[in-house]
Structure formats: C-alpha cells, structure tokens
Amino acid sequence: MNGQRLSQAIAGQPVRVFARIRNRGTLPAFPTRVSFAFVDASLGIAWSAPRLIGETGTDVPPNQLGPGVKDVECPEPWVPGASSTHACLLVMCDEVLMDHPAVPWSAGFDRHVAQRNVTILPAGPGKTLAFRLQFATVLSEGAAVRFAAQAAWVKAPDPEQALRYVPGREEPRGELQGTLLDTDVLRETVRPGRIEALGEVKQGPLELKSPTSRELPAFVPVGPRLESQPRELRGMDVDITVPMRVEAPYLLVRLAQVEDAHVTGGYTVLLQLREG
C-alpha cells in the first residue's frame, strides 16, 4: 500500500491511497473486490474497528508469463481527521465468487489483508516523541499480553529503503546497513507508559484460535505484562527518545504486541535524524 509515497497524511487534506495486489495463482482473479479502510494508530486491531474509505472492483492477472500484479487506486480520497494522521491503512481483497477472507481485516492472519502503519518523523538527538496507540485482544480467548521492541540505526539512501532493514538480511554493496541498539539503550529509547481502558469492542467476529507461534528475532520485552480479555480495548502511551549518540541517518523502531506466545499486532516508527 502507498499514498503520497512515504509522506505523512495531513489532517483535513485529501490523500490518494493505492494498493498493489498480487495474484500467486495460475488463473485470473476476477471479479476482485478491493476494500480500503483505516483505524487509529493501533497494535492489535479489533476486526470491527476499521472505517471504510472506499471499494472498487478489478481483475488481477495470473502469475504466468508475468508477475501477476495489479495496482489499484481507492476510488475515494482519504481525508484524515485530527486524530488520524498516524492511522493504520488497511486493504482487503475478496475474489467475489470463490476466494473470501477467513479473518476479515486481520493482516496477521489472513493473506487477503495488507496493513501499513508506518510513521516517519524528523527528530534530533535527545528528542522525545510521544505516541498514543490502541490495542485489543485479538485471540478469541483471554491472553497474557506483553509488548516487545526492536530498534536499529539504519544507513540507507532514502526512507523507503530504510524501512526494508531486517537484522541479518542486509542489501548487497552496502546500500542498506543496520546496527541494533543494545538492550539497555533500547529500553531507554522505547518506554511504554500509561495504559487505560477505552471500552469494549461490541461488533466483529472473535473466532480465531491461537495461531502458530512466530519468533521475534532481536526484539526485547518492554513495558508491563497484562491480562486481557476478548473484546477489551485499551490505550497506551509510548515515548520514543532519540539517543544522544547518533550513529546513522535513520532510527528504525518496531513495536510488537504478543499474546501468550503469538505475535498479533505491530507498529513501526522511522525517525529521520536532523542536526540542531
């Protein structure tokens, strides 16, 4: 998904939203319904929460003699509200006749759904940025919820390349290089704070059982461990402070929501370092 490349959305101003749909099968996907939606900045997303921006129909070519890719524009511009400039954008595909999402609006558990929840901000050494994130229990049963973080200094030619950094998977020729923050420095950099109850998710299916566990390489537990029940919606304040010793043009921070041993949500912040 992409909007104005990797620029931030501006409250009250329309933004064009696009999705790139991939068909990995050997037959055309037609008719394909593409739905665009958003939620406020979140980790685990309650499936009833996304607010629809628009829907359109298209056909996606097969993965034969070509990549099976189709770029689709949302028919309606997205006009973010005052609280939505760091929202999570979601796209869901539905091959109307045969292939339907099993878990609507859940990017972590359904291949028909994609999610972009990246925030890119300028920052200087020692600056603290405050974020307000929502989270809900995604599993259908009560779970122990905790949070983990990964942070790295990244050298890259532009923000889009910096977002591709994954520990152990650096690009050839030195175009993309990353250095993970030490555990102690990371815990000083990423600090979950006040958590409050926001109410209850009143709609949407909660039928998903525990998925297969996924490893979290280079992630460090941060913040408290909570007991949470299905449909329970909470808000959490998160502070990210740029270390005084700057080692690269970008600081990439990834947050993960973990229920029991299962990753059920995440949020990414890319800080573009500036002098002064």
Image (cartoon, grey):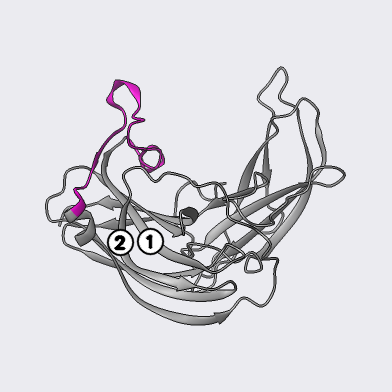
Q: Evaluate whether residue 246 shows in this view.
A: yes
Badge 1 marks a residue whose secondary structure is strand
Query: Circle 1 sits on which residue?
Result: 147
Residue shown at 40%/38% (left/top)?
164
Labels 2 and 1 touching (C-beta < 8 A): yes
What amino acid is found at the position of numbered circle 1 in the picture?
A: Phe
Where residue 230 sits in the image (x, y, percent)? 58, 71
**Residue 32 position by quadrant:** top right
> Where is 119 relative to 112, above or below?
below
Q: Which residue ends up furthest to the right in the rendered image?
A: 97
The residue at the far top in this view is: 65
Identity of the residue drawn at 70% across and 33% down: 23
Single out the residue that lies furthest toward the left: 245
Relative to 253, residue 203 above or below:
below
Q: Write the residue at 33% across / 29% down.
A: 170
Label 2: which residue? Answer: 222
Residue 257 in the image: state x and y as whole percent. Answer: 44, 59
- Place of residue 88 in the rendered image (x, y in percent of width and height, measured from the top left): 53, 59
Secondary structure type for disc 2: strand
Horizontal relation, residue 55 to residue 43: left or right: right
Instruction: Give, as a single range, the part of the protein colored magenta.
Output: 157-183
Dot 2 amino acid type: Val
2 or 1: tag closer to the N-terminus = 1
